[in-house]
Image: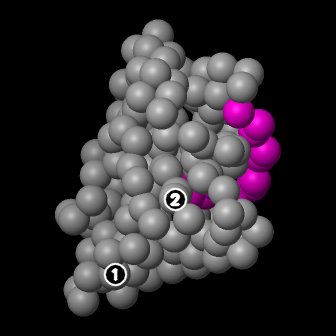
Amino acid sequence: MKLYVLRHGETEGNVQGIMSGHRESYLTENGREEARKVRDLIQDKHIDMIIASPLIRTKETAEIVSNGSIPIIYDDRLKSRNHGEFAGMKRDSVNLKDYWNYKINKQYEKAESARDIYHRAEDILKDVKKEYSNKTVLLVTHSGICRMIYYYFHGIPEDGDMLSGYKAVTGRLEEYDL
């Protein structure tokens, strides 16, 4: 089956360098324009359905991309990484190298671990493959889930570093065979 993955459009939090996680952050006008460009890009891809995170930034992105012509369902497993105690902090104030290392798998008081988010992404991919094997599906999600999906298909680096080898870009459409 063909699987497309899209990180939501640019948000206010992205512009400010904030770790939003489960906190709501709204699309900027640039983010809406990114979603409109993806809508135009997928016209010939014959997408049967969109599965999206229920957070506002992904819902709005999915609605723009769908343009009312592709059914959308929402799944909590596509939510951003729960940043717990780091939510709302500037990205440059957190040791992201350890935060995104599968091997280190640092445990935090409230934040979701790297392995937990990886297994959450793995879980939804297995379900999508099982339930929609004859469909072309677009997942609209967040940078952390995009990162985990990338490593699901390309393998986790031996050193566990899931930060250096992949960069999720707002409004970028990725394609996989599931």
Q: Is residue 135 above or below residue 27?
A: below
Query: Which residue type carries mark 1?
Result: Gly
Give how far across and how far down residue 58 sits, in percent: 61, 35
Q: Position of residue 111 (x, y in %)?
A: 58, 64
Q: Judge whether residue 32 can be spotted in this image.
A: yes
Dot 2: what SS? strand
Q: Earlier in the sequence, mark 1 or mark 2?
A: 2
Q: Which residue corresponds to the image point at 24% horizontal and 89% vertical from the top-left?
A: 158
Q: Is residue 6 above or below residue 28?
A: below
Task: Look at the numbered disc 1 and give the secondary structure of its residue.
Answer: loop
> Which region of the structure is painted magenta?
70-82
Instruction: In the rendered structure, find residue 155 and report the number of the disc placed on it.
Output: 1
Q: Nearer the viewer, residue 126 or 103?
A: 126
Residue 166 image offset from top left, x and y in percent: 27, 59
Q: Position of residue 127 (x, y in %)?
A: 71, 72
In the rendered view, does 83 fall on the left or right side of 73? left
Marks 1/2: CA distance? 19 Å
Q: Residues within 10 Å of mark 2 (few under 14, many from 20)?
A: some
Residue highlighted by disc 2: 2
Q: Does the magenta portion include 72?
A: yes
Query: Please, is residue 71 above or below residue 39 in the view?
Result: below
Residue at (75, 53) in percent of width and height: 75
Residue, x 64% and y 76% (percent of image)? 126
141 drawn magenta: no
- Which image quarter holds the N terminus? bottom right
Q: Is residue 13 visible?
A: no
Q: Are marks 1 and 2 in contact (CB under 8 Å)?
A: no
- Amino acid found under the numbered disc labelled 2: Lys
